[in-house]
């Protein structure tokens, strides 16, 4: 069996495992040549174990079984500390609430998430400026201005939502290597939420002939309430990740 | 959220940790000895051999970094050969420096193991 005979899905699973090991080795500051040597050896081992397991084209189940037999990526954080497949001595009872694990690599901020989070602020600022500019202009000029500005805002909201969703997927797939889910989620939800809010209020305003001041005041409430949410969420994430002292 | 930490006994002793430390001291010697016995061996083959040894049962996350370090220290020479199962296999063999290091380790190990064995057997009587 060679890597060429593997389906892309199986190849992706192997790459995911190798990437995990690579991240741990990087965090342990293992030099690049050694990292590559270790990763090559692990890849060879996976493929040889697969070849031993089945003479035919391996299935996803075969590969998962092989991967389950291997040490998890975190085991490589210990360097040459000895890891055994099965302990030969009866393990001492471990304290239930203390988990001795490899030091996890510190998560880094996702660029996409930061982009999505910043996009919310830019979008809100842009929306506010558009509305205020239109109000300041008044008359037909305001109508023409909004005719161009509002579709652009809606388009920007969809783009920001796309970036936010992309960031969320990337962070979720990184298995803890990336952080910033709060900003990603904010980027994915808020602009679109505002757009729907505006549309709903437009419909309501048209139906009940609400005056424009009440309309804008009502529109402002969700903005004010929603804006601190990413910050609150980010703070929550930060404290959630902080290890308990003494543990 | 409340965390509980089990209180450690005054005479707390972790048998697994002790065995791990013991194996750690022997790791370099057993890897060199495995390769020396086979003349030349590739990574997975070495892992297979060492994972089956009772009391050692070393796994790949220990062996591969060790092989890499021994190569860097010039105790092992490496050559690549195409493999029917994926990327080229890395074959390791001992360099003259590796042979000398293994000899010194084995000498020391024999002395220590004989003394410990005599101590344990003598202590029982």
Image: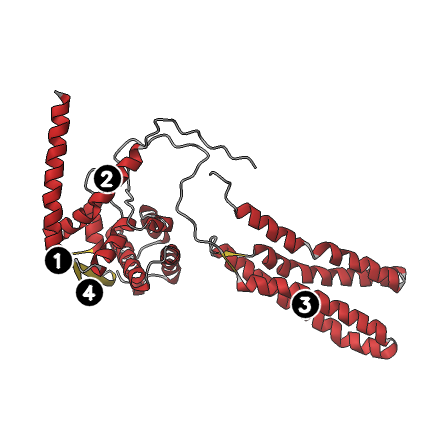
Of badges 4 and 3, the one in the foreground is: 3
Front in this rendered view, residue A107 or B22: B22
Q: Which residue is mark 3?
A: A122
Do tag 3 and tag 2 residues touch (Cβ < 8 Å)?
no
- Which residue, given by chain and number where applicable, does mark 4 sit on? B80
Circle 3 packing at 10 Å, graded few (<14), some (14-19), many (20+), is few
Q: Chain of mark 1?
A: B
Q: Are marks 2 and 4 on the same chain?
A: yes
Q: Left or right? Give the position of A209 relative to A24.
A: right
Spot occupied by residue A71 in the image (x, y as percentages of width and height): 33, 48
Q: Quadrant of residue B91?
A: bottom left
Per the model, the C-alpha gap separating discs 3 and 1 is: 64 Å
| Other residues around mark 4 within 10 Å, as few (<14) / some (14–19) / many (≥20) | few
> Is residue A59 shown left or right of residue B43?
right
Q: Where residue A153 sits: x, y (%)?
A: 71, 70
Q: Dividing the picture into quarters, in which one does residue A23 lie? A: bottom left
Name the residue carrying label 1: B97
Residue picked out by circle 2: B22
Whichever of callouts 2 and 4 sits on the residue coming sooner in the sequence is: 2
Q: Position of residue A3 (x, y in %)?
A: 30, 63
């Amino acid at each position: 069996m060679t890597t060429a005979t593997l389906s892309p899905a199986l190849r992706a699973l192997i790459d995911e495992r190798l990437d995990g090991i690579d991240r741990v080795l990087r965090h342990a500051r293992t030099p690049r040549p050694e990292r590559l040597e270790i990763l090559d050896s692990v890849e060879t081992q996976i493929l040889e174990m697969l070849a031993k397991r089945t003479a035919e084209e391996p299935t996803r189940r075969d590969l998962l079984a092989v991967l389950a037999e291997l040490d998890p990526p975190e085991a490589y954080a210990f360097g040459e500390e000895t890891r055994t497949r099965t302990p030969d001595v009866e393990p001492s009872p471990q304290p239930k609430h203390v988990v001795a694990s490899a030091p996890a690599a510190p998560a880094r901020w996702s660029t996409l998430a930061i982009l999505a989070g910043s996009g919310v602020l830019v979008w809100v600022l842009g929306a506010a400026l558009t509305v205020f500019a239109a109000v300041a202009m008044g008359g037909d000029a305001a109508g023409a201005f909004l005719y161009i500005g509002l579709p652009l805002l809606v388009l920007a909201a969809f783009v920001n939502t796309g970036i936010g969703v992309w960031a969320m997927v990337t962070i979720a797939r990184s298995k803890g290597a990336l952080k910033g889910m709060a900003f990603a989620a904010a980027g994915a939800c808020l602009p679109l939420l505002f757009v729907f809010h505006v549309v709903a209020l437009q419909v309501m305003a048209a139906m009940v002939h609400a005056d424009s001041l009440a309309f804008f005041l009502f529109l402002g409430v969700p903005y004010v309430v929603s804006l601190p949410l990413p910050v609150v969420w980010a703070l929550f994430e930060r404290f959630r990740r902080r290890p308990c002292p003494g543990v | 959220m409340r965390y509980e930490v089990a209180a450690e006994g005054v005479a707390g002793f972790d048998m697994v940790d002790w065995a791990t430390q013991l194996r750690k001291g022997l790791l370099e010697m057993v890897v060199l000895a495995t390769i020396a016995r086979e003349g030349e061996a590739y990574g997975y083959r070495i892992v297979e051999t060492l994972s089956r040894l009772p009391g050692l049962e070393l796994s790949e996350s220990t062996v591969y970094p060790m092989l890499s370090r021994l190569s860097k220290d010039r105790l092992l020479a490496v050559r690549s050969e195409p493999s029917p199962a994926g990327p080229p296999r890395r074959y390791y063999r001992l360099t003259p420096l590796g042979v000398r290091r293994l000899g010194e380790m084995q000498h020391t190990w024999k002395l220590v193991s004989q003394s410990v064995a005599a101590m344990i057997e003598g202590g029982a009587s």
